[in-house]
Image: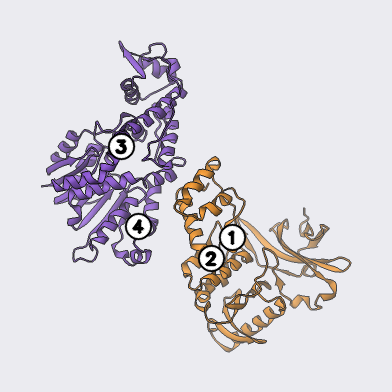
Amino acid sequence: MLSTIGAWSEIIWLLTSKDRVKQVHEYHRAINTNAMRKEGWFDFMKTPRTIEDIMNHFGYTDYPYLTKFLEAFIKDEILIRENGTYRTNGTIGEIPVNPPDVFNKGIVQVHADALDAVPNRLRGIYTTFSDDMNTFNWDDTLQLQMYEKIRKGAFRYSGALKRSGKFLDIGCGNGVETAAIWGYYYKKGAFESDAPVKIYALEYDENLLQIAKEEFVISTSRVTGIDRKIIEDLEEHHPIFVQGSADNLPFEDEFFDMVFTSQVIHWCDAKKATHDIMRVLKSSGLFFGTEAFCPILDPHIELFILLNEGAYGAIKREDFFQWAKEAGASEAKSATPAGIFKVVKS
Amino acid sequence: MTIADTITEFKCRVCGEPLRFDLKDSSAYISKSGHEDFFGMKLTTYRVAHDTKDERHFNTVIVDHAGFFRGHRDAYTEPLDKISPSIERNYWVFHEEGPTIDKTDNVTLALLISRTDRWVVDIVCPKRLNVSETATLVIDRVEEASRVYDVIPQPMEARIADMDIRAWISDDRVLCVSFTNGALARAIDSIASQIVAETEDSIIPRRRMLNAIFRILEKNPNLSPSLLLRIMNEDMLFSPLHTPFEERIPSIVERTAQRYPIAGEILGQLLRGYITLVDVLEGDFSSRYEEVFELIDFVNRRRILG
């Protein structure tokens, strides 16, 4: 119970404004609507059209992705579905785009660039984390305070700081998260104990991984306030950075005591990743983190996630727990709308 | 601007007069360097002079293996009445790429001398000093030491006029430094072997790079050898930076400055190619070299540079 209160206390600021969830939705709804307006959807759909009409007219090839897009617009009452056809709900003008106050310029630019990638995605061409200015923009995005808050919530909920041994941070991105986690354990004296924590950090994107690895000391000092010299002197306790994917972990079975992921599993094959994480976890090991489970994940954000090849999209909490149990979990539970979870292997 | 099998033509960089000289006639030029390989071309540097009414114009030109003129390395003027009669013994003092540092708190003299091609770069040098004669005397001392020792102690210590000097020596080059105190001795010692090493990419080491190193060392005598080596080997030191995201430069600068405030002062100009890294390091930012390099690494890792 106390751990649940701890998790809530970290993320409560995200929810203090009743309108914040609405802000996020309206922002994504606006940018997606404007993008598809630019693509010519709403002029074309003044007359009722079938999915086949839309695919043929625009040269789209990805039926499931198109269906998800149409569903999101129906939910927002921008489109109306009748007898297997889609038409606009009146005139659809340009919608003002107001980024939520929890966003920074990096994430806004990521979304703006991603919209240019939507028509290609509908034609079967995916984008990556490293396209154009994405490395720069994602690096900025991952500094967002909301990521720090939900991470802290996950640590409080899971009790991970009371454990030791090998720790895997999956989807470490630019390493800011790994730096913060290293700082948590440093402040707990975990690197001075007889059984020190050893952190491994995994990232699929090579550009972000390079930043994480080469800027570890700089990032850690910046996010934790620990002097650079102290961090440099603890080199033997620095994380080991590894390139790889959550759904194909480059580690032996039962190698880790703890595995952490925060808003990562939806970027890969979620079921396969859950199974593989359980595989690399030792008996009684802890798998914890955060995941915006369905239906909390906004449908428009899911469309954005699905621009990347291999992304799973929104995950149902029940499915996730089921996958974990199939792979040997004895306990799986979650708290808060941010999807803070913990799974213990039997 | 050339040709013939052995005749090379070019225009004097000082006065614009067309000049020609025969590569096979050693009396047609003052000195020449060894070959330098540059993307498959064998380049040689020749020092050529011609006289006007009361001046001698010295041109140092790069010539390829076919005898084609490929560019100037250096050019300067001396009054005819001050030209030494024994010019063939003189060292070619490399004049271009910024001024010599007159003196620093820790160093009174720093010369880089070529033993084989007879040039000298006066990095730190008082105006009253005869650079060519000093270089000659330094090399005399080195040659004397090489007769005395099987292996010359490094750094070799000697006295030239009223100056105590230390010299780091390779087969091709000598770095000669006279210190006012011991503050920079260790730092210079840590990079001297790199400075005197023959490099493939430059017949003459870049004076501005050496100047920047000495300026930075003045600000921080304890500078780590790794950073000094970084400056020496930095590919981007002299080249204008470029970004494929030109229209986003204001946003890049603003966002980068949130983590590196120095970005607000220099990044826009760097990304637009108005200034180069060496301009930054030899100017007001020489004391902030760590921030400068962290900034360059920051934007480079984020694939902002094209």
State the image coordinates of residue A66 (x, y, percent, origin top left).
35, 23
Determine the image quadrant of residue A198: bottom left
The local secondary structure at tag 4 comes to helix
Q: Which chain is purple?
A: A
The lab-note entry on whether marks 2 and 3 share a chain reads no
Image mark for residue A3? none
Chain B shade in the render: orange
Distance (Cα) linking label 1 and label 2: 13 Å
Q: Work out whether A223 lies above or below A21.
A: below
Closer to the camera in the image, A235 or A176? A176
Identify residue type, mark 1.
Answer: Val
State the image coordinates of residue A94 (x, y, percent, origin top left).
45, 24
Q: Chain of mark 1?
A: B
Q: Chain of mark 2?
A: B
Foreground: disc 2 or disc 3 = 3
Foreground: disc 4 or disc 1 = 4
Quick one: which residue is furthest to the right in this view? B53
Distance (Cα) linking label 4 and label 2: 24 Å
Image mark for residue B278? 1
Earlier sequence position, callout 4 versus callout 3: 3
The lab-note entry on whether marks 1 and 2 share a chain reads yes
Identify residue type, mark 2.
Answer: Ser
Q: Which residue is mark 4?
A: A220
Q: Which residue is mark 2?
A: B287
Q: Chain of mark 3?
A: A
The local secondary structure at tag 1 comes to helix
Identify residue type, mark 4.
Answer: Thr
The lab-note entry on whether marks 1 and 3 share a chain reads no
Distance (Cα) linking label 4 and label 3: 31 Å
Task: Specify the color scheme.
Answer: by chain
Q: Are marks 4 and 3 in contact (CB under 8 Å)?
A: no
Quick one: which residue is furthest to the front in this view? A17
